[in-house]
Image: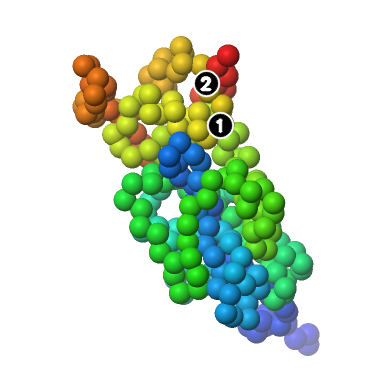
Amino acid sequence: MATRKTASTKNDFPRPFTTVDVLIFTVIDDALKVLLVQRPSDTGEPHPGAWALPGGFVNVDLDADLEACARRKLREKTGVASPYLEQLGSWGSAARDPRGWSATHAYFALIASDGVTLAKGANAADVAWFTVDQPLLAKKKLAFDHAAILRAGVERLRSKVEYTSLPAYLLPEPFTLPQLQRTYEVVLGRPVDKSGFRTRMMAADFLAEAGVVESDSNRPPMGYRLKDRGTPVFFPRTFSPRG
């Protein structure tokens, strides 16, 4: 009589390290910023003293899935619980971490800078905002393969901003239409045509009036809020550059 094979309950094969990294973007002083943490210099861990994207190992006792891990890391570093969050992609190899075969799952988050409280955490020497085009980032000096992940995140964000309402997630509410247009321009790195901006924003029907906003103008501008913070709006065409 043949015996039936039973599945082993033991971890009888090597497992890769599994981490989640979060690219946290905001706009401060008319510049697109990303949050980085500095790795401690007095430990035996890789890349001592280098700057890196915030993240860490998946905690199987706390994280129901990868997005839960990303939200936990975001909350730990900024105190923000529910911003816009999107999965960017996965990076894995035997060479990206000297401790062994590893795979990381990257997300990017968009938050308004007001009310954010940065926290270093137990395994970070420092935490700070960096302009995405600063030499530190351009010269690939980030830990692990985080420079490549950051480049992919900036490219994804700028590409999607061309045809979505994503910049609205970078503003504190209420915001004015000129503030929203300026945020588009900051993220894209170029001016956009003003003539059709208001028409496009109003036609997309994703903004709700929130009353007039204090201003030095004789005619205080209208403030707006997002009708739905859960899903961005997609436009039928990209923005035209302003000549």
**Image check: 237 left or right of 208?**
right
Q: Quadrant of the C terminus?
A: top right
Q: Is residue 218 visible?
A: yes
Relative to 95, is 198 on the left or the right?
left
Amino acid type, residue under disc 1 in the picture: Leu
Q: Which residue is mark 2?
A: 192
Q: Position of residue 182 (x, y in %)?
A: 44, 28
Q: Is residue 70 above or below residue 102?
A: above
Judged from this view, the residue extending furthest toward the top is 195
Q: Which residue is mark 1?
A: 188
Q: Amino acid at mark 2?
A: Val
Residue 194 in percent (x, y) is at: 46, 16
Q: Residue at x 64, y 59 (%)?
A: 142
The answer to whether the residue labelled 2 contacts the one labelled 1, judged by CB atoms less than 8 Å apart, is yes
Residue 49: image quadrant is bottom right
Q: Is residue 133 above or below residue 69?
A: above
